[in-house]
Image (cartoon, coloured by chain):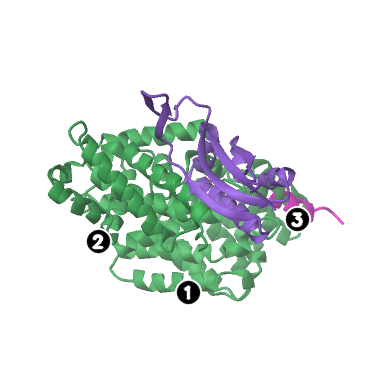
Chain colours: A purple, B green
Amino acid sequence: MSQFLYIYRVTAQSRQEAMGTPERAQQSMQRWMKWMADLDARGHLKDRGQPLENTGKVVRGQNAVVDGPYTEAKDLVGGYTIVEARDIDQAAELSLGCPILAGGGSVEVRPVMKMDM
Amino acid sequence: MELSEHLFRRESGRLVAALTRIFGIHNLALAEDVVQDAFCRALEVWKVRGVPDNPSGWLMAVAKNRALDIVRRERTARTFAPEIARVLESEWTLAPAIEEAFASPVMRDEQLKMMFSCCHPSLPEETQIALVLNTLCGFGASEIASAFLVGRAAMEKRISRGKKILAGEKRLFDLSHADFDSRLSAVRRALYLLFSEGYHSASSETAVRTELCGEAIRMTRLLLEAPSAAQPETYALAALMCLHAARLPGRIDVSGDLNPLLEQDRSRWDRKLADEGLALLDRSATGEVVSAYHLEAAIAAAHDAAPSVEATNWKAIVQLYDRLMEVAPSPVVALNRAIAIAQIEGPESGLEALHAIPDAGRLSRYPFYPAALGELELRRGNLDAARSHFSSAAALARNPVERRFLERRANVCAPE
Protein backbone atom coordinates (compact mmCIF):
# COMPACT_ATOMS: atom_id res chain seq x y z
CA MET A 1 0.00 0.00 0.00
CA SER A 2 1.16 3.53 -0.74
CA GLN A 3 0.24 6.77 0.93
CA PHE A 4 -1.53 9.66 -0.73
CA LEU A 5 -2.32 13.15 0.40
CA TYR A 6 -5.78 14.52 -0.23
CA ILE A 7 -5.72 18.30 -0.38
CA TYR A 8 -9.21 19.75 -0.15
CA ARG A 9 -9.77 22.87 -2.16
CA VAL A 10 -12.91 24.82 -1.47
CA THR A 11 -14.44 27.57 -3.54
CA ALA A 12 -16.79 30.30 -2.37
CA GLN A 13 -19.53 28.44 -4.18
CA SER A 14 -18.81 25.07 -2.57
CA ARG A 15 -18.79 26.72 0.83
CA GLN A 16 -22.14 28.35 0.14
CA GLU A 17 -23.48 25.07 -1.14
CA ALA A 18 -22.38 23.30 2.03
CA MET A 19 -23.38 25.99 4.49
CA GLY A 20 -26.41 27.70 2.92
CA THR A 21 -28.78 26.95 5.81
CA PRO A 22 -28.33 25.18 9.15
CA GLU A 23 -30.11 22.14 7.75
CA ARG A 24 -27.83 22.02 4.74
CA ALA A 25 -24.77 22.44 6.96
CA GLN A 26 -25.94 19.46 8.93
CA GLN A 27 -26.45 17.40 5.81
CA SER A 28 -22.97 18.30 4.57
CA MET A 29 -21.56 17.28 7.91
CA GLN A 30 -23.34 13.96 7.77
CA ARG A 31 -22.07 13.28 4.27
CA TRP A 32 -18.49 14.06 5.31
CA MET A 33 -18.69 11.87 8.37
CA LYS A 34 -20.13 9.03 6.40
CA TRP A 35 -17.45 9.34 3.75
CA MET A 36 -14.65 9.43 6.35
CA ALA A 37 -16.13 6.50 8.27
CA ASP A 38 -16.37 4.56 5.04
CA LEU A 39 -12.70 5.20 4.15
CA ASP A 40 -11.81 4.15 7.67
CA ALA A 41 -13.90 0.98 7.58
CA ARG A 42 -12.22 -0.09 4.35
CA GLY A 43 -8.79 0.46 5.86
CA HIS A 44 -7.79 3.43 3.71
CA LEU A 45 -7.66 6.13 6.35
CA LYS A 46 -4.07 6.68 7.49
CA ASP A 47 -4.39 10.12 9.08
CA ARG A 48 -7.61 12.10 9.30
CA GLY A 49 -5.54 15.25 8.91
CA GLN A 50 -6.41 18.75 10.05
CA PRO A 51 -8.69 21.54 8.95
CA LEU A 52 -6.99 24.85 8.12
CA GLU A 53 -7.99 28.42 8.93
CA ASN A 54 -8.87 30.52 5.91
CA THR A 55 -6.36 33.19 6.77
CA GLY A 56 -2.60 33.21 7.20
CA LYS A 57 0.50 34.70 5.66
CA VAL A 58 2.16 34.16 2.35
CA VAL A 59 5.92 34.56 2.36
CA ARG A 60 7.87 35.22 -0.83
CA GLY A 61 11.51 36.21 -0.75
CA GLN A 62 13.09 38.20 2.04
CA ASN A 63 10.75 41.11 2.66
CA ALA A 64 7.62 39.93 1.03
CA VAL A 65 5.40 38.66 3.83
CA VAL A 66 1.78 39.39 3.00
CA ASP A 67 -1.57 38.43 4.43
CA GLY A 68 -2.96 35.56 2.50
CA PRO A 69 -4.04 33.41 0.93
CA TYR A 70 -5.52 35.90 -1.46
CA THR A 71 -9.21 36.33 -1.11
CA GLU A 72 -9.53 36.64 -4.85
CA ALA A 73 -8.06 33.15 -5.24
CA LYS A 74 -10.55 30.88 -6.91
CA ASP A 75 -10.08 28.17 -4.33
CA LEU A 76 -8.48 27.84 -0.92
CA VAL A 77 -6.88 24.84 0.72
CA GLY A 78 -9.35 23.93 3.42
CA GLY A 79 -7.58 20.94 4.93
CA TYR A 80 -5.92 17.62 4.21
CA THR A 81 -6.11 13.90 4.89
CA ILE A 82 -3.66 11.05 4.31
CA VAL A 83 -5.04 7.85 2.82
CA GLU A 84 -3.53 4.50 1.93
CA ALA A 85 -4.27 2.98 -1.45
CA ARG A 86 -2.91 0.47 -3.89
CA ASP A 87 -1.98 3.08 -6.44
CA ILE A 88 -2.81 6.57 -7.60
CA ASP A 89 -5.78 5.31 -9.60
CA GLN A 90 -7.38 3.75 -6.57
CA ALA A 91 -6.61 6.84 -4.47
CA ALA A 92 -8.27 9.04 -7.07
CA GLU A 93 -11.23 6.72 -7.30
CA LEU A 94 -11.71 6.75 -3.53
CA SER A 95 -11.79 10.55 -3.56
CA LEU A 96 -14.79 10.54 -5.90
CA GLY A 97 -17.10 10.12 -2.92
CA CYS A 98 -15.82 13.26 -1.23
CA PRO A 99 -18.74 15.62 -0.50
CA ILE A 100 -16.64 18.64 -1.39
CA LEU A 101 -17.06 17.74 -5.06
CA ALA A 102 -20.82 18.25 -4.96
CA GLY A 103 -20.46 21.99 -4.45
CA GLY A 104 -17.73 22.58 -7.03
CA GLY A 105 -14.75 22.12 -4.70
CA SER A 106 -11.93 19.72 -5.58
CA VAL A 107 -9.65 17.12 -4.10
CA GLU A 108 -6.03 17.17 -5.17
CA VAL A 109 -4.60 13.67 -4.88
CA ARG A 110 -0.80 13.58 -4.46
CA PRO A 111 1.31 10.50 -3.88
CA VAL A 112 3.55 10.79 -0.85
CA MET A 113 7.08 10.25 -2.16
CA LYS A 114 8.59 6.92 -1.21
CA MET A 115 12.03 7.13 0.33
CA ASP A 116 14.26 4.24 -0.76
CA MET A 117 16.92 4.01 1.86
CA MET B 1 -20.85 10.36 18.46
CA GLU B 2 -23.83 10.68 16.15
CA LEU B 3 -25.29 14.05 15.22
CA SER B 4 -28.76 14.46 16.66
CA GLU B 5 -31.42 15.27 14.11
CA HIS B 6 -31.72 18.94 13.12
CA LEU B 7 -29.02 19.88 15.66
CA PHE B 8 -27.82 22.90 13.70
CA ARG B 9 -31.31 24.16 12.98
CA ARG B 10 -32.29 23.87 16.66
CA GLU B 11 -29.08 25.47 17.92
CA SER B 12 -29.36 28.26 15.39
CA GLY B 13 -32.39 29.83 17.09
CA ARG B 14 -30.88 29.57 20.58
CA LEU B 15 -27.54 31.00 19.55
CA VAL B 16 -29.02 33.86 17.54
CA ALA B 17 -31.18 34.75 20.55
CA ALA B 18 -28.22 34.78 22.97
CA LEU B 19 -26.06 36.79 20.59
CA THR B 20 -28.84 39.29 20.00
CA ARG B 21 -28.93 39.91 23.74
CA ILE B 22 -25.30 41.03 23.47
CA PHE B 23 -25.25 42.75 20.10
CA GLY B 24 -28.76 44.23 20.17
CA ILE B 25 -31.60 43.50 17.77
CA HIS B 26 -30.34 46.16 15.34
CA ASN B 27 -27.31 43.88 14.85
CA LEU B 28 -29.39 40.79 14.06
CA ALA B 29 -27.43 40.23 10.85
CA LEU B 30 -24.17 40.22 12.82
CA ALA B 31 -25.59 37.63 15.24
CA GLU B 32 -26.58 35.47 12.27
CA ASP B 33 -23.09 35.79 10.78
CA VAL B 34 -21.52 34.63 14.02
CA VAL B 35 -23.78 31.59 14.12
CA GLN B 36 -23.04 30.78 10.49
CA ASP B 37 -19.35 31.10 11.29
CA ALA B 38 -19.66 28.73 14.24
CA PHE B 39 -21.35 26.17 11.98
CA CYS B 40 -18.54 26.57 9.42
CA ARG B 41 -15.95 25.85 12.08
CA ALA B 42 -17.94 22.90 13.35
CA LEU B 43 -18.16 21.48 9.85
CA GLU B 44 -14.41 21.85 9.28
CA VAL B 45 -13.38 20.40 12.63
CA TRP B 46 -16.03 17.75 13.23
CA LYS B 47 -15.75 16.19 9.82
CA VAL B 48 -12.14 15.37 10.63
CA ARG B 49 -12.18 14.94 14.39
CA GLY B 50 -15.69 13.58 14.80
CA VAL B 51 -18.63 15.06 16.68
CA PRO B 52 -17.67 16.18 20.22
CA ASP B 53 -19.43 14.77 23.29
CA ASN B 54 -21.34 17.97 23.82
CA PRO B 55 -21.96 19.47 20.39
CA SER B 56 -24.25 22.24 21.71
CA GLY B 57 -21.63 23.27 24.24
CA TRP B 58 -18.96 23.23 21.54
CA LEU B 59 -20.98 25.52 19.28
CA MET B 60 -21.81 27.78 22.19
CA ALA B 61 -18.14 28.10 23.15
CA VAL B 62 -17.22 29.13 19.60
CA ALA B 63 -20.04 31.67 19.52
CA LYS B 64 -19.04 33.10 22.90
CA ASN B 65 -15.44 33.55 21.80
CA ARG B 66 -16.48 35.23 18.59
CA ALA B 67 -18.81 37.53 20.50
CA LEU B 68 -16.03 38.46 22.88
CA ASP B 69 -13.68 39.23 19.98
CA ILE B 70 -16.27 41.31 18.18
CA VAL B 71 -17.24 43.37 21.21
CA ARG B 72 -13.58 44.04 22.07
CA ARG B 73 -12.69 45.01 18.55
CA GLU B 74 -15.73 47.06 17.69
CA ARG B 75 -17.04 48.56 20.90
CA THR B 76 -15.85 52.03 19.96
CA ALA B 77 -17.16 51.87 16.41
CA ARG B 78 -20.46 50.06 16.91
CA THR B 79 -23.26 50.30 19.43
CA PHE B 80 -24.40 47.05 20.93
CA ALA B 81 -27.46 46.19 23.02
CA PRO B 82 -28.53 49.34 24.88
CA GLU B 83 -29.63 47.26 27.88
CA ILE B 84 -26.13 46.04 28.61
CA ALA B 85 -24.01 48.68 26.87
CA ARG B 86 -22.36 49.75 30.12
CA VAL B 87 -21.46 46.21 31.07
CA LEU B 88 -19.81 45.59 27.72
CA GLU B 89 -17.55 48.61 28.11
CA SER B 90 -15.40 47.18 30.87
CA GLU B 91 -13.14 44.17 30.60
CA TRP B 92 -14.19 43.26 34.16
CA THR B 93 -17.81 42.80 33.30
CA LEU B 94 -17.64 41.87 29.61
CA ALA B 95 -16.85 38.16 29.94
CA PRO B 96 -19.42 37.50 32.69
CA ALA B 97 -22.06 39.34 30.64
CA ILE B 98 -21.40 37.14 27.65
CA GLU B 99 -21.39 34.06 29.85
CA GLU B 100 -24.78 35.11 31.21
CA ALA B 101 -26.32 35.58 27.76
CA PHE B 102 -25.69 31.90 27.09
CA ALA B 103 -27.16 30.60 30.37
CA SER B 104 -30.19 28.38 29.69
CA PRO B 105 -32.95 30.44 31.37
CA VAL B 106 -31.62 33.61 29.76
CA MET B 107 -31.47 31.98 26.33
CA ARG B 108 -35.05 30.80 26.78
CA ASP B 109 -36.26 34.27 27.65
CA GLU B 110 -34.33 35.77 24.77
CA GLN B 111 -35.99 33.32 22.38
CA LEU B 112 -39.37 34.29 23.78
CA LYS B 113 -38.62 37.99 23.40
CA MET B 114 -37.58 37.29 19.83
CA MET B 115 -40.78 35.36 19.23
CA PHE B 116 -42.89 38.19 20.62
CA SER B 117 -40.94 40.70 18.55
CA CYS B 118 -41.47 38.67 15.36
CA CYS B 119 -45.23 38.89 15.94
CA HIS B 120 -45.21 42.67 15.78
CA PRO B 121 -48.71 43.97 14.96
CA SER B 122 -47.44 46.03 12.03
CA LEU B 123 -46.27 42.87 10.26
CA PRO B 124 -48.66 40.76 8.18
CA GLU B 125 -49.26 37.33 9.71
CA GLU B 126 -47.49 35.52 6.87
CA THR B 127 -44.40 37.63 7.55
CA GLN B 128 -44.61 36.91 11.27
CA ILE B 129 -44.62 33.19 10.57
CA ALA B 130 -41.75 33.44 8.11
CA LEU B 131 -39.71 35.40 10.66
CA VAL B 132 -40.34 32.88 13.42
CA LEU B 133 -39.31 30.06 11.09
CA ASN B 134 -36.21 31.92 9.99
CA THR B 135 -34.85 33.42 13.20
CA LEU B 136 -36.09 30.94 15.80
CA CYS B 137 -36.41 27.66 13.94
CA GLY B 138 -33.32 28.05 11.74
CA PHE B 139 -35.02 27.52 8.37
CA GLY B 140 -33.47 29.24 5.38
CA ALA B 141 -35.56 31.44 3.07
CA SER B 142 -35.42 28.80 0.35
CA GLU B 143 -36.71 26.12 2.71
CA ILE B 144 -39.57 28.30 3.95
CA ALA B 145 -40.39 29.25 0.36
CA SER B 146 -40.71 25.63 -0.69
CA ALA B 147 -42.83 24.75 2.33
CA PHE B 148 -45.25 27.58 1.56
CA LEU B 149 -45.16 27.14 -2.21
CA VAL B 150 -43.89 30.68 -2.64
CA GLY B 151 -41.04 31.74 -4.91
CA ARG B 152 -37.66 31.97 -3.25
CA ALA B 153 -37.13 35.62 -4.20
CA ALA B 154 -40.53 36.60 -2.85
CA MET B 155 -39.82 34.82 0.42
CA GLU B 156 -36.40 36.45 0.75
CA LYS B 157 -38.06 39.81 0.25
CA ARG B 158 -40.73 39.03 2.82
CA ILE B 159 -38.15 38.01 5.40
CA SER B 160 -35.83 40.92 4.80
CA ARG B 161 -38.72 43.37 5.00
CA GLY B 162 -39.73 41.82 8.30
CA LYS B 163 -36.20 41.94 9.60
CA LYS B 164 -35.92 45.59 8.72
CA ILE B 165 -38.90 46.30 10.95
CA LEU B 166 -37.45 44.07 13.68
CA ALA B 167 -34.05 45.72 13.50
CA GLY B 168 -35.66 49.14 13.52
CA GLU B 169 -36.99 48.50 17.01
CA LYS B 170 -34.68 49.80 19.70
CA ARG B 171 -34.93 46.60 21.65
CA LEU B 172 -36.70 43.27 21.70
CA PHE B 173 -40.18 43.03 23.14
CA ASP B 174 -40.09 43.37 26.92
CA LEU B 175 -41.86 40.40 28.52
CA SER B 176 -43.07 42.60 31.39
CA HIS B 177 -44.62 45.11 28.99
CA ALA B 178 -48.24 46.19 29.52
CA ASP B 179 -49.11 44.83 26.06
CA PHE B 180 -47.91 41.37 27.00
CA ASP B 181 -51.32 39.69 26.82
CA SER B 182 -52.34 41.09 23.49
CA ARG B 183 -48.95 40.28 21.98
CA LEU B 184 -49.15 36.80 23.46
CA SER B 185 -52.40 36.20 21.64
CA ALA B 186 -50.74 37.31 18.38
CA VAL B 187 -47.93 34.83 19.09
CA ARG B 188 -50.45 32.05 19.68
CA ARG B 189 -52.24 32.94 16.48
CA ALA B 190 -48.99 32.82 14.48
CA LEU B 191 -48.06 29.45 15.97
CA TYR B 192 -51.57 28.17 15.27
CA LEU B 193 -51.28 29.25 11.62
CA LEU B 194 -47.83 27.70 11.38
CA PHE B 195 -49.24 24.44 12.66
CA SER B 196 -52.24 24.55 10.30
CA GLU B 197 -49.95 25.23 7.37
CA GLY B 198 -48.02 22.09 8.21
CA TYR B 199 -51.14 20.07 8.89
CA HIS B 200 -53.40 21.03 6.05
CA SER B 201 -51.90 22.22 2.88
CA ALA B 202 -49.06 23.91 1.11
CA SER B 203 -46.17 21.62 0.39
CA SER B 204 -47.13 18.15 -0.66
CA GLU B 205 -43.97 16.71 0.85
CA THR B 206 -44.79 14.77 3.98
CA ALA B 207 -41.49 15.48 5.68
CA VAL B 208 -41.91 19.24 5.37
CA ARG B 209 -45.42 19.16 6.77
CA THR B 210 -44.39 17.09 9.76
CA GLU B 211 -41.46 19.38 10.43
CA LEU B 212 -43.62 22.50 10.39
CA CYS B 213 -46.04 20.87 12.83
CA GLY B 214 -43.11 19.78 14.97
CA GLU B 215 -41.68 23.28 15.06
CA ALA B 216 -45.04 24.79 15.98
CA ILE B 217 -45.26 22.34 18.88
CA ARG B 218 -41.69 23.05 19.95
CA MET B 219 -42.29 26.81 19.97
CA THR B 220 -45.54 26.41 21.91
CA ARG B 221 -43.76 24.24 24.48
CA LEU B 222 -41.16 26.98 24.82
CA LEU B 223 -43.99 29.42 25.45
CA LEU B 224 -45.32 27.15 28.20
CA GLU B 225 -41.95 27.22 29.94
CA ALA B 226 -42.48 30.89 30.73
CA PRO B 227 -44.87 31.27 33.68
CA SER B 228 -46.42 34.47 32.30
CA ALA B 229 -47.15 32.86 28.93
CA ALA B 230 -48.37 29.55 30.35
CA GLN B 231 -52.01 30.64 30.37
CA PRO B 232 -54.99 28.29 29.91
CA GLU B 233 -55.31 29.36 26.28
CA THR B 234 -51.66 28.51 25.62
CA TYR B 235 -52.15 25.07 27.15
CA ALA B 236 -55.22 24.63 24.96
CA LEU B 237 -53.20 25.58 21.87
CA ALA B 238 -50.47 23.09 22.77
CA ALA B 239 -53.14 20.46 23.41
CA LEU B 240 -54.81 20.96 20.06
CA MET B 241 -51.49 20.72 18.24
CA CYS B 242 -50.52 17.48 19.98
CA LEU B 243 -53.97 15.95 19.53
CA HIS B 244 -54.00 16.76 15.81
CA ALA B 245 -50.36 15.84 15.22
CA ALA B 246 -51.05 12.46 16.85
CA ARG B 247 -53.18 11.65 13.81
CA LEU B 248 -50.64 12.83 11.22
CA PRO B 249 -49.13 9.35 10.66
CA GLY B 250 -52.58 8.09 9.66
CA ARG B 251 -53.45 11.14 7.60
CA ILE B 252 -50.83 10.66 4.93
CA ASP B 253 -50.13 7.09 3.91
CA VAL B 254 -46.85 5.53 2.83
CA SER B 255 -47.27 6.57 -0.77
CA GLY B 256 -47.89 10.17 0.30
CA ASP B 257 -51.63 10.02 -0.34
CA LEU B 258 -54.18 11.79 1.80
CA ASN B 259 -56.52 9.63 3.88
CA PRO B 260 -59.71 11.18 5.17
CA LEU B 261 -60.34 10.83 8.91
CA LEU B 262 -63.15 8.37 8.31
CA GLU B 263 -60.84 5.94 6.51
CA GLN B 264 -57.68 6.20 8.58
CA ASP B 265 -55.87 3.25 10.07
CA ARG B 266 -56.16 4.32 13.70
CA SER B 267 -53.44 1.96 14.86
CA ARG B 268 -50.96 4.27 13.15
CA TRP B 269 -51.90 7.22 15.33
CA ASP B 270 -49.27 8.40 17.80
CA ARG B 271 -50.73 7.43 21.18
CA LYS B 272 -47.96 9.04 23.18
CA LEU B 273 -48.56 12.40 21.55
CA ALA B 274 -52.31 12.00 22.00
CA ASP B 275 -51.81 11.33 25.72
CA GLU B 276 -49.62 14.37 26.01
CA GLY B 277 -52.35 16.37 24.29
CA LEU B 278 -54.96 15.09 26.73
CA ALA B 279 -52.75 16.01 29.69
CA LEU B 280 -52.29 19.50 28.26
CA LEU B 281 -56.03 19.80 27.71
CA ASP B 282 -56.55 18.97 31.38
CA ARG B 283 -54.15 21.71 32.37
CA SER B 284 -55.95 24.17 30.09
CA ALA B 285 -59.20 23.67 31.97
CA THR B 286 -58.68 26.45 34.46
CA GLY B 287 -60.01 29.97 34.40
CA GLU B 288 -63.26 31.16 32.93
CA VAL B 289 -62.57 31.62 29.27
CA VAL B 290 -63.33 28.81 26.86
CA SER B 291 -61.37 29.83 23.80
CA ALA B 292 -61.55 28.55 20.24
CA TYR B 293 -58.34 26.64 21.01
CA HIS B 294 -60.08 24.87 23.90
CA LEU B 295 -62.98 23.84 21.68
CA GLU B 296 -60.82 22.73 18.78
CA ALA B 297 -58.66 20.72 21.16
CA ALA B 298 -61.74 19.10 22.68
CA ILE B 299 -62.99 18.13 19.21
CA ALA B 300 -59.60 16.66 18.34
CA ALA B 301 -59.60 14.80 21.66
CA ALA B 302 -62.99 13.26 20.85
CA HIS B 303 -61.61 11.93 17.56
CA ASP B 304 -58.39 10.69 19.16
CA ALA B 305 -60.30 8.87 21.88
CA ALA B 306 -62.56 7.02 19.45
CA PRO B 307 -61.49 3.49 18.49
CA SER B 308 -63.52 3.73 15.25
CA VAL B 309 -65.70 6.08 13.22
CA GLU B 310 -68.83 4.39 14.55
CA ALA B 311 -67.69 4.58 18.15
CA THR B 312 -67.01 8.31 17.86
CA ASN B 313 -69.02 10.59 20.11
CA TRP B 314 -70.47 12.62 17.22
CA LYS B 315 -73.09 14.18 19.44
CA ALA B 316 -70.46 15.75 21.67
CA ILE B 317 -68.56 16.85 18.56
CA VAL B 318 -71.60 18.62 17.12
CA GLN B 319 -72.15 20.38 20.43
CA LEU B 320 -68.53 21.50 20.48
CA TYR B 321 -68.89 22.82 16.92
CA ASP B 322 -72.03 24.68 17.99
CA ARG B 323 -70.03 26.44 20.69
CA LEU B 324 -67.17 27.06 18.32
CA MET B 325 -69.65 28.76 15.97
CA GLU B 326 -70.46 31.12 18.84
CA VAL B 327 -66.86 31.83 19.81
CA ALA B 328 -65.20 31.90 16.42
CA PRO B 329 -67.73 31.49 13.63
CA SER B 330 -66.34 30.66 10.19
CA PRO B 331 -67.64 28.84 7.13
CA VAL B 332 -64.99 26.14 7.58
CA VAL B 333 -66.21 25.46 11.11
CA ALA B 334 -69.79 25.31 9.78
CA LEU B 335 -68.62 22.86 7.11
CA ASN B 336 -67.07 20.54 9.68
CA ARG B 337 -70.16 20.82 11.83
CA ALA B 338 -72.32 19.72 8.88
CA ILE B 339 -70.14 16.65 8.36
CA ALA B 340 -70.54 15.70 12.03
CA ILE B 341 -74.32 16.16 11.75
CA ALA B 342 -74.38 13.80 8.78
CA GLN B 343 -72.71 11.15 10.98
CA ILE B 344 -75.63 11.30 13.41
CA GLU B 345 -78.66 12.13 11.32
CA GLY B 346 -77.65 10.86 7.89
CA PRO B 347 -76.50 12.45 4.63
CA GLU B 348 -79.73 14.42 3.96
CA SER B 349 -79.40 16.39 7.21
CA GLY B 350 -75.73 16.91 6.48
CA LEU B 351 -76.48 18.28 3.02
CA GLU B 352 -79.13 20.53 4.49
CA ALA B 353 -76.61 21.90 6.97
CA LEU B 354 -74.07 22.40 4.18
CA HIS B 355 -76.53 24.35 2.07
CA ALA B 356 -77.49 26.44 5.09
CA ILE B 357 -73.96 27.73 5.68
CA PRO B 358 -74.53 31.48 5.84
CA ASP B 359 -71.51 32.83 4.00
CA ALA B 360 -70.78 29.77 1.89
CA GLY B 361 -69.51 32.15 -0.79
CA ARG B 362 -66.28 32.38 1.16
CA LEU B 363 -65.81 28.68 0.54
CA SER B 364 -65.94 29.04 -3.25
CA ARG B 365 -62.19 28.36 -3.58
CA TYR B 366 -62.10 25.74 -0.82
CA PRO B 367 -61.91 22.24 -2.35
CA PHE B 368 -63.34 20.52 0.70
CA TYR B 369 -66.71 22.22 0.37
CA PRO B 370 -67.61 20.50 -2.93
CA ALA B 371 -65.80 17.43 -1.59
CA ALA B 372 -68.15 17.32 1.41
CA LEU B 373 -71.16 17.70 -0.90
CA GLY B 374 -69.78 14.84 -3.00
CA GLU B 375 -69.19 12.64 0.02
CA LEU B 376 -72.79 13.03 1.24
CA GLU B 377 -74.33 12.64 -2.21
CA LEU B 378 -72.28 9.48 -2.60
CA ARG B 379 -73.55 8.21 0.71
CA ARG B 380 -77.15 8.58 -0.34
CA GLY B 381 -76.46 6.88 -3.65
CA ASN B 382 -76.53 9.95 -5.87
CA LEU B 383 -73.50 8.93 -7.94
CA ASP B 384 -73.75 11.48 -10.75
CA ALA B 385 -74.08 14.44 -8.41
CA ALA B 386 -71.30 13.07 -6.24
CA ARG B 387 -68.93 12.66 -9.18
CA SER B 388 -69.54 16.15 -10.43
CA HIS B 389 -68.91 17.61 -6.95
CA PHE B 390 -65.66 15.69 -6.63
CA SER B 391 -64.57 16.88 -10.06
CA SER B 392 -65.15 20.51 -9.12
CA ALA B 393 -63.29 19.85 -5.88
CA ALA B 394 -60.34 18.37 -7.77
CA ALA B 395 -60.23 21.47 -9.96
CA LEU B 396 -59.77 23.58 -6.80
CA ALA B 397 -57.06 21.34 -5.30
CA ARG B 398 -54.11 23.32 -3.95
CA ASN B 399 -51.49 20.65 -4.35
CA PRO B 400 -50.94 17.29 -6.04
CA VAL B 401 -51.78 15.33 -2.87
CA GLU B 402 -55.21 16.94 -2.64
CA ARG B 403 -55.77 16.53 -6.37
CA ARG B 404 -54.92 12.82 -6.35
CA PHE B 405 -57.21 12.27 -3.39
CA LEU B 406 -60.17 14.10 -4.93
CA GLU B 407 -59.75 12.45 -8.32
CA ARG B 408 -59.72 9.10 -6.57
CA ARG B 409 -63.00 9.99 -4.88
CA ALA B 410 -64.50 11.02 -8.22
CA ASN B 411 -63.50 7.65 -9.70
CA VAL B 412 -65.23 5.82 -6.86
CA CYS B 413 -68.49 7.32 -8.16
CA ALA B 414 -68.08 5.87 -11.65
CA PRO B 415 -71.19 3.90 -12.64
CA GLU B 416 -70.80 0.10 -12.45
Quarter of image, res B107: bottom left
> Residue B317 appears at what percent x and percent y?
51, 68
Q: Are marks 3 and 1 on the same chain?
A: yes
Q: Looking at the image, which residue is at 53% across and 46% down? A: A24
Label 2 vs 3, first from the N-terminus = 2
Residue B228 badge: 2
Chain for numbered disc 2: B
Callout 2: SS: loop
Q: Looking at the image, which residue is at 61% across and 60% down? A: B350
Q: Nearer the viewer, mark 3 or mark 1?
A: 1
Q: Mark 1–mark 2 contact, CB under 8 Å? A: no
Seen from the viewer's position, the closer of residues A89 and B400 is: A89
Residue that mark 1 sits on: B275
Can you see residue B290? Answer: no
Label 1 vs 2, first from the N-terminus = 2
Q: Mark 2–mark 3 contact, CB under 8 Å? A: no
Image height check: is B228 above or below B127?
Answer: below
Q: Which contiguous range is marked in magenta? A: B405-416
Left or right position of B359 against B407: left
Callout 3: SS: loop
